[in-house]
Amino acid sequence: MLKSNTGFIKEFGKNKVLFLMLMPTVLYFIVFAYLPMAGLIVAFKSYNYSQGIFFSPWSGFENFGYFFKSGVAFQVTRNTIVFNLIFIVTSVIASVAIAVFLSEMRNRYFKKVSQSFLIFPYFISWVVVAAFVYNVFNYDYGVFNEILRSLGFEPINIYSKTSYWYVLLPLLHIWKNVGYSSAIYFASIAGINTEYYEAARVDGANTFQRIRHITLPFLKPTVIVLVLLSVGQILRGNMDMFYQLIGNNGMLFNGTDVIDTYVFRSLTGGADLGLTSAATFYQSVMCFAVIYVTNMIVKRADKDYALF
């Protein structure tokens, strides 16, 4: 222990500037990530506003019992996992395909313009997207239903059936995030030594063969790391996206309500704070378990690709 402390002090003295640069990040996580963790204690208490967090009576696992017995736990967990799995798979496929396509383009102007158009939706707020979707798909005066009526078809009310959102939400997620994700894969492809491609061309490899045997294998580590990071968030719903698009539409809760929107609605609706804290605590524990198990599986397959 003494040796390790001495080593740390020696390292600190050697790299004072680097440690000083690290301080803002460390303080940020202490204030906004670690200190709020004390609030998790509410999940084990019968919270009373007049007594506060620390003086409210203990309730053990009672809040967790209510959460699981209500049937909401299974529903929001299923929706969160299913949508995140769809988002991960579709996002990886679309991002890699676009990155590979752009890397094969020789026209630099076309590449720059394409990347600018693709990454632009990433900076648009979900509030704006929700307003756009509402005006396009509104049952009474939406553009989509006006076109259907003019063609003699029956209008479609997407705000009454969850099945439409299993298609619309992944499409919107891809449209908004594919530009940002593909930029990461594109940067990885740009780092591949061009001698591999030149050697492949000399050997007579066509474009598809070069992609299959050079580009995709070199992209594999980046794909694994990004998928691992995404899997770690598999039990965290995209709050902005789901709440802005679905809102408080009770007809869609069965298929689109995720853990984050459930907790937010519970808090704003004045429900028991202990119950909502139990849901959040359950979400955090499950996220940790999922990323730990996934990392263990990756480590067994190839330890070089594991996060820890």
Image (cartoon, grey):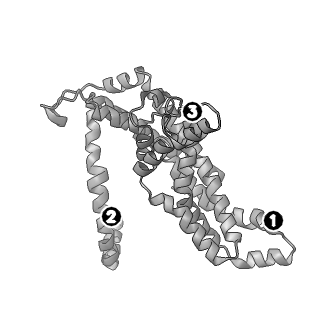
- Cα–Cα span, label 2 and label 3: 49 Å
Query: Can residue 218 be seen in this snapshot?
Result: no
| Relative to 135, 104 lies left or right | right
Residue 124 in percent (x, y) is at 44, 57
- Cα–Cα span, label 1 and label 3: 44 Å
- Residue kind at label 3, given as amino acid type: Ile
Q: Earlier in the sequence, mark 1 or mark 3?
A: 3
Which is more toward the observer, 15 or 108? 108
What residue lies at 50% left-to-right and 29% top-to-bottom? 160
- Cα–Cα span, label 2 and label 1: 44 Å
Classify residue 61 by image quadrant.
Answer: top left
Element marked by disc 2: helix
Residue 81 in percent (x, y) is at 53, 38
Instruction: Between label 1 and label 3, give the one nearer the viewer.
Output: 3
Instruction: Single out the residue that lies furthest toward the right.
Output: 204
Tell whether label 3 touches label 2 (CB within 8 Å).
Answer: no
Q: Which residue is mark 3?
A: 156
Q: Residues within 10 Å of mark 2 (few under 14, many from 20)?
A: few
Q: Earlier in the sequence, mark 2 or mark 3?
A: 2
What residue lies at 48% left-to-right and 34% top-to-bottom? 140
Q: Earlier in the sequence, mark 2 or mark 1?
A: 2
Tell whether label 1 touches label 2 (CB within 8 Å).
Answer: no
Element marked by disc 1: helix
Q: Which residue is mark 2?
A: 25
What residue lies at 54% left-to-right and 68% top-to-bottom? 116
Which is more toward the observer, 19 or 103? 103
Instruction: Between label 2 and label 3, give the one nearer the viewer.
Output: 3
Q: Which residue is mark 1?
A: 209
- Residue kind at label 2, given as amino acid type: Thr
- Residue kind at label 1, given as amino acid type: Gln
Element marked by disc 3: loop
What residue lies at 45% left-to-right and 41% top-to-bottom? 245
